[in-house]
């Protein structure tokens, strides 16, 4: 998306027909969110739920994934480093106050705060300036070809509400302190948050004063996190819930055969991989003293080539994981077939590499995984542990629920860890900056929790941030992905294929980012 010429969005509202036969909608997945603070913790399930209540200046159309107007109706380039946004008239927060430029300026600055995990979406922004009550300018450090795609994830909060409730700064997810915005929400979106009992249920009600018109007919949403896969499926079969976001692979055949249900499949823009601590001089809990074996490229290659990704795809994922050799999925700019090719699985090669690195008998290492975030995450890690044991690597596996897992890895407390990374911008810069850029400021390395560092990678990422020549930028994206492959910054496993299971009477749009767009859900 070049920003060379004037960009003027058509001031089209989300033209949805009036709802018919309004209904409640009950749904579930294995995960729970960690906060209602919209700038605090960055993960897809949470952001998808936040979008019911809070809105951004622009958002993706669920059918086309093109950027469309939401709280901004138009935008244009004043200069290559200055974008002007016209705000939508008549938008009110859930408390009845009118949204204005002060709220937008405050919210975008809040997303840039030190405690925010949304800084990858603010990269390249120098400052946000109020022009008048309905106009703001975003001033850029340099031209930014993906600014609009970044803005889809930056939601708007009431400045007055945040100040009144002492929530001016985002909650620090690495700490234990809470703010009012952690457990409460007040946005401009199509639904209001009525209640949240963590690990129990979340209830939303239709916002009667929403500025938009809705295609769907859902008046009440009830989200229930259910960790047990069997219990989730039983809830769908009994009619207790209308929709399961994450049915397990082993249940799909009987769900597809049930005449009262339907399963909709789609390739997610999320890649599952393992990260490794390449920073510490000695790994906690390892029997290797005085050095860190994960700093050795031969060791990282050995761990990679000891994993039989095809077997995991076939036996554990049952086709819901497409093996990959890189950090992004095929829908993401920068991916090529060559860069996505895996190194071959070979136990013999892995053993040889370990011996060359000085570990002929292997070593012990800490291995952490979530147990309720990705499809069969715990089972995958158990399989990887068994595969590594064949080359003498004794991985001490520990699994945690996502609300504890993500703060733990962000505190750099795992030697090897699993992570799944979706790409909301559909541009590899988002992954490269977050995962392999040396940890710094402004979103650089914000999820580089293995603290990988490579001078050439930093140069490429920093160039990509500002490059507006599309062919040149595309080549650099691919070069950076290939450099990640060559240096084994991470161990890629697979791209997730996401099946959604629902009652026959439910209509919804399957999104590549695995989010439920409640504006379009119909219960017939």
Image (cartoon, rainbow, N blue to C red):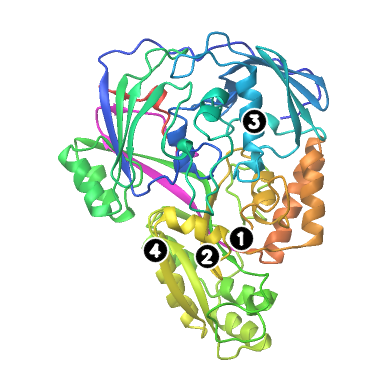
Query: Residue at the location (35% across, 46% down)?
Result: 246
Q: How many residues crowd around disc 4 within 10 Å: few (fewer than 14), some, or many (20 or more)?
A: many
- Marks 1 and 4, how far apart at CA: 20 Å
Whether residue 511 is in magenta: the answer is yes
Asked if disc 3 and disc 1 are in contact, CB closer than 8 Å, the reply is no
Q: Earlier in the sequence, mark 1 or mark 4?
A: 4
- Along the line of sight, the residue nearer the viewer: 416 or 255: 416
Name the image quarter holding the N terminus.
Answer: top right
Q: Earlier in the sequence, mark 4 or mark 3?
A: 3
Query: Residue at the location (67% across, 85% down)?
Result: 357
Q: Nearer the viewer, mark 1 or mark 4?
A: 1
- Along the line of sight, the residue nearer the viewer: 180 or 410: 180
Asked if disc 1 and disc 4 are in contact, CB closer than 8 Å, the reply is no
Q: How many residues crowd around disc 2 within 10 Å: few (fewer than 14), some, or many (20 or more)?
A: many
The overriding secondary structure of the stretch rendered in magenta is strand
Query: Residue at the location (64% across, 18% down)?
Result: 101
């Amino acid at each position: 998306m070049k920003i060379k010429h004037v960009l003027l969005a058509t001031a089209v509202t989300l033209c949805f027909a009036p709802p018919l036969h309004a209904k409640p909608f009950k749904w579930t997945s294995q995960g729970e969110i960690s906060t209602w603070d919209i700038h605090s913790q960055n993960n897809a399930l949470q952001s998808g739920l936040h979008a019911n209540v809070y809105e951004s200046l622009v958002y993706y159309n669920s059918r086309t994934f093109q950027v469309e107007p939401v709280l901004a109706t138009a935008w244009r380039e004043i200069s290559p480093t200055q974008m002007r946004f016209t705000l939508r008239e008549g938008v009110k927060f859930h408390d009845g106050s009118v949204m204005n430029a002060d709220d937008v300026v405050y919210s975008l600055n809040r997303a840039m705060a030190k405690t925010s995990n949304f800084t990858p979406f603010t990269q390249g922004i120098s400052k946000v300036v109020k022009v008048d009550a309905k106009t703001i300018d975003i001033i850029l450090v340099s031209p930014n070809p993906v600014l609009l795609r970044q803005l889809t994830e930056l939601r708007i909060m009431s400045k007055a509400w945040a100040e009144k409730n002492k929530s001016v700064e985002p909650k620090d997810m690495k700490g234990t302190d809470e703010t009012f915005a952690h457990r409460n929400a007040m946005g401009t979106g199509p639904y209001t948050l009525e209640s949240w009992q963590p690990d129990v249920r979340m209830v939303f009600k239709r916002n009667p004063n929403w500025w938009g018109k809705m295609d769907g007919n859902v008046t009440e949403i009830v989200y229930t996190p259910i960790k047990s896969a069997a219990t989730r499926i039983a809830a769908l079969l009994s009619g207790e819930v209308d929709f399961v976001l994450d049915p397990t692979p082993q249940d799909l055949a009987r769900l597809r055969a049930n005449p009262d249900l339907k399963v909709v499949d789609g390739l997610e823009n999320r890649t599952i991989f393992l990260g490794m601590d390449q920073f510490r001089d000695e790994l906690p809990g390892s029997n290797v003293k005085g050095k860190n074996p994960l700093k050795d490229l031969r060791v990282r290659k050995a761990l990679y080539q000891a994993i039989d990704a095809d077997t995991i795809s076939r036996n554990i994922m049952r086709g819901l994981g497409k093996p990959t050799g890189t950090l992004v999925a095929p829908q993401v700019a920068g991916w090529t077939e060559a860069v996505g090719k895996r190194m071959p699985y070979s136990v013999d090669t892995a053993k040889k590499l370990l011996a060359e690195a000085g570990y002929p008998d292997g070593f012990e290492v800490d291995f952490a995984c979530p147990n309720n975030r990705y499809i069969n995450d715990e089972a995958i890690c158990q399989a990887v542990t068994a595969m590594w044991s064949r080359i003498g690597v004794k991985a001490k596996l520990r699994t945690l629920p996502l609300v504890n897992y993500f703060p733990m890895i962000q505190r750099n407390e795992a030697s090897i860890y699993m992570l799944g990374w979706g790409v909301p911008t559909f541009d590899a810069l988002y992954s490269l900056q977050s995962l392999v850029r040396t940890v710094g400021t402004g979103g650089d390395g914000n999820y580089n929790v293995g603290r990988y560092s490579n001078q050439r990678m930093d140069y490429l990422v920093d160039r990509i941030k500002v490059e507006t020549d599309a062919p040149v930028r595309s080549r650099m994206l691919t070069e950076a992905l290939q450099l990640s492959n060559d240096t084994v910054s991470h161990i890629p496993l697979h791209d997730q294929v996401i099946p959604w299971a629902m009652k026959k009477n439910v209509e919804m749009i399957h999104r590549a980012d695995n989010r439920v767009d409640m504006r379009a859900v119909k219960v017939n």
